[in-house]
């Protein structure tokens, strides 16, 4: 994979994660909150998204500057950005896995209910 292709893949990652979070915040979290107490207070989840997006903005800015030729690709900077992003991202994913695991989900939803979740 060329550096240019890698950088474009990085931009796709940023865009996909931003889109996923918008869908979660506007459609999925409010729907889940109708039955699941963990989603009733969405502030923590949205705050995690905001922290993640600050890291994504820094990452995206560096990647775009590299693609434009405004700066050299600095692997150490990429690593630092992703390491900082990773802490909150992994915590967020762990929280979601805990709250959306089969055991927890079965307390509030049937299989039929789950098939109706707007996605």
Image: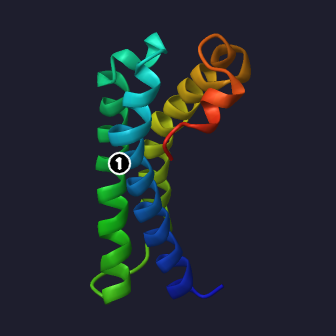
Instruction: Give percent across and percent down for residue 22.
Output: 35, 48
The residue sitting at 60% across, 88% down in the picture is 2
Is residue 64 shown left or right of residue 34?
left
- Which image quadrant: the N terminus? bottom right
The residue sitting at 49% across, 39% down in the picture is 89
Vertical relation: 59 (above or below) 117:
below
Quarter of the image where one finds residue 116: top right
Q: How many marks?
A: 1
Is residue 38 shown left or right of residue 110?
left
Q: Nearer the viewer, residue 97 or 118?
A: 118
The residue sitting at 43% across, 77% down in the picture is 73
Q: Nearer the viewer, residue 84 or 14?
A: 14
Vertical relation: 57 (above or below) 72:
above
The residue sitting at 33% across, 24% down in the picture is 42
Q: Nearer the viewer, residue 53 or 115?
A: 115
Quarter of the image where one finds residue 63: bottom left
Secondary structure of residue under mark 1 = helix
How many residues crowd around disc 1 within 10 Å: few (fewer than 14), some, or many (20 or more)? some
Instruction: Give percent across and percent down for residue 43.
Output: 29, 23
Vertical relation: 13 (above or below) 86:
below
Is residue 57 shown left or right of residue 7?
left
Instruction: Give percent across and percent down for residue 112.
Output: 67, 30
Vertical relation: 58 (above or below) 3:
above
Which residue bears the numbered disc 1?
22
């Amino acid at each position: 994979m060329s550096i240019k292709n890698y950088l474009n893949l990085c931009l796709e990652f940023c865009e996909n994660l931003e889109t996923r979070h918008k869908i979660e915040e506007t459609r999925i979290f409010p729907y889940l909150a109708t039955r699941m107490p963990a989603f009733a207070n969405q502030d923590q989840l949205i705050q995690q998204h905001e922290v993640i997006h600050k890291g994504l903005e820094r990452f995206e800015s560096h990647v775009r500057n590299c693609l434009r030729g405004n700066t050299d690709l600095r692997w150490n900077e990429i690593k630092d950005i992703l390491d900082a992003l990773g802490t909150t991202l992994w915590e967020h994913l762990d929280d979601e896995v805990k709250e959306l695991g089969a055991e927890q989900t079965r307390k509030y939803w049937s299989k039929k209910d789950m098939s109706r979740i707007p996605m």
